[in-house]
Image (cartoon, rainbow, N blue to C red):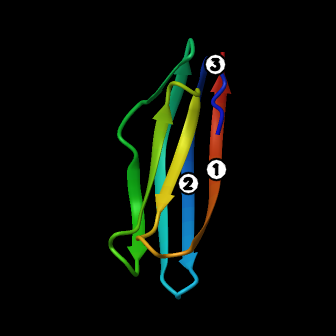
Amino acid sequence: MSVPVNSTWTFRVFVAGRASNGKAAGYCFRGFLENENSAVRMLEAVNTEDSAEDDTSWDANVAANDSYDALVITARGSTGDSVRWTAVIYTVEVRW
């Protein structure tokens, strides 16, 4: 998700995944991010508020990506799983 230059975000991210074999996972993150003169960074470590996984090798993460001026969500299942992932992102933004 593109973060505009000279903006600050408060965000919550909800991620859910379900595999064709019935395994599932869910994650909830919150954090604070800024893009100051095209330098994107988290203002503190992302807080994983909650997570649940049928398979502990599954994972989801939220990170600042300075190369793309973006908030990036990544998710992975285990080898051999066919997983569908979805995410919803709530943001509050201020720019100056």
Is residue 8 among what the camera can see? yes
Q: Which residue is drawn at 38% across and 50% down?
A: 47
Give the CA distance from mark 3 to mark 1.
Answer: 19 Å
> Which one is in front, 46 or 81?
81
> Who comes first in sequence, dot 3 or dot 1?
3
Amino acid type for the residue under numbered disc 3: Val
Residue at the spot x=56%, y=61% of the render? 14
Residue type at tag 1: Tyr
Residue 9 visible in this rendered orientation of the protein: no
For residue 90, which numbered disc appears in the image? 1
Residue denoted by label 2: 13
For label 1, the crowd category at 10 Å Cα-Cα, with few meaning under 14, some 14 to 19 and many 20 or more, is: few
Q: In which quarter of the image is residue 20?
A: bottom right
Instruction: Check whether the beta carbons of the residues at disc 2 and disc 3 lie within 8 A of each other.
Output: no
- Near mark 2 (Cα within 10 A), the count class, few <14, some 14-19 or many ≥20, is some
Residue 85 place in picture, x, y as percent = 60, 66
Seen in the picture, residue 19 relative to 91 is either above or below; the reply is below
Q: Quick one: which residue is furthest to the top in this view?
A: 37
Q: Give, as a three-letter code, the residue at label 2.
A: Val
Give SS at disc 2: strand
Q: How many marks?
A: 3
Q: Position of residue 66 (x, y in %)?
A: 50, 25
List x then y, in percent, for residue 37.
Answer: 56, 11
Asked if 17 appears above or below 32 in the picture, the reply is: below
Callout 2–callout 1 Cβ contact below 8 Å: yes
Where residue 32 is drawn, which disc sits there?
none
Task: Give the mark, 2 or 3, whose residue is nearer the N terminus.
Answer: 3
User: Residue 5 got which mark?
Assistant: 3
Split into 4 quadrants, where in the image is the C terminus? top right
Q: Which of marks 3 and 1 is in front?
A: 3
